[in-house]
Image (cartoon, rainbow, N blue to C red):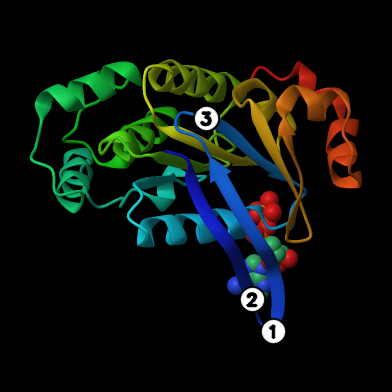
Amino acid sequence: MTITAYSLSVQRAGRTILHPTTVDIRPGERVGLVGASGSGKSTLGHALIDALRAAGTGVAHVPQSPDEALDPLRSMVFHWRETEQALGLAADDARRKDLFDALHIGTGDLRNRPWGWSRGMQQRFVIAMALIGSPDLLVMDEPTSALDPVVAADTMDLLDTYLKTRKTALLLITHDLGLAARRVSRLLVMDAGRIVEDARTARILSTPETAAAKALCAHRNWLELPC
Ligand SMILES: Nc1ncnc2c1ncn2[C@@H]1O[C@H](COP(=O)(O)OP(=O)(O)OP(=O)(O)O)[C@@H](O)[C@H]1O
């Protein structure tokens, strides 16, 4: 069933930073939310997560940096168990092995604290945690911007492969059109708190219609980036 959130809007400090916006995403669909800095991407992402969770939709969130998700004083196994418990799931070694294999983190020592793992492994661990409950939607906000380009590309490749056989949809929030172009089939372009263009990725890249989409597409150097 299509995931829909109607008429999301956000006011802060007396200013409307998200104008009424309806978002719909099909099961398994890969959607990019792109726009210039300050256009309202993260605001829409958070409003969408809150509204969908309130309606009972399973939504997981991957933040920009693993530091936002991992407590430096806690072991990796603590984080994993805490997530399972929060989801009301019993510990399941087979599920953990599947996710660890899929995201190539099987060599990590779960007794370590986050700083005992590389940054790339930490972020893949955070992605694996987000997938524990097989969410309907995975929202990733600039998920690879803290990683070097090769590690970032590898991480997105592993996630692509994993999601191929699942119904989990993906909303990828990024100002990096190059990343979005390689990873999603549909783009939502934001400008000043509104979605101003919503179309297939290939169409927006070839014939952007709005000033915001044209501005993003004008910076063609992103074509050279590996992720
Ligand atoms: N708590 C807040 N109070 C006031 N204004 C806010 C608040 N949070 C965000 N804003 C403003 O809302 C607008 C949208 O911010 P938002 O972070 O959603 O944009 P963004 O597109 O995600 O930007 P970036 O790519 O830089 O993260 C910006 O002008 C920002 O300054």
* Residue in view at x 30 percent, y 52 percent: 71
Residue type, label 1? Gly
Residue 25: image x %, image y %? 53, 40
Write the residue at 77% across / 17% down: 224
Q: Are marks 1 and 2 in contact (CB under 8 Å)?
A: yes
Instruction: Report the residue marked by disc 1.
Output: 14
Q: Nearer the viewer, mark 2 or mark 3?
A: 3
Using the image, tell me which numbered label, if any, was put on residue 29.
Answer: 3
Residue type highlighted by circle 3: Glu
Quarter-of-image position of residue 227: top right
Q: Residue furthest front?
A: 1
Residue at the limit of the structure toward the bottom, as seen here? 14
The 10 Å Cα crowd at callout 1, few under 14, some 14 to 19, many 20 or more, is few
Q: Is mark 2 within 8 Å of ligand 1?
A: no
The residue tagged 2 is 11
Q: How far apart are the alpha carbons under marks 2 and 3?
A: 29 Å
Indicate the position of residue 82 as horizontal and vertical percent values: 18, 49
User: Relative to residue 59, is residue 182 depicted above or below?
Assistant: above
Nearest the viewer among 119 and 170 is 170
- Quadrant for the N terminus in the image: top left
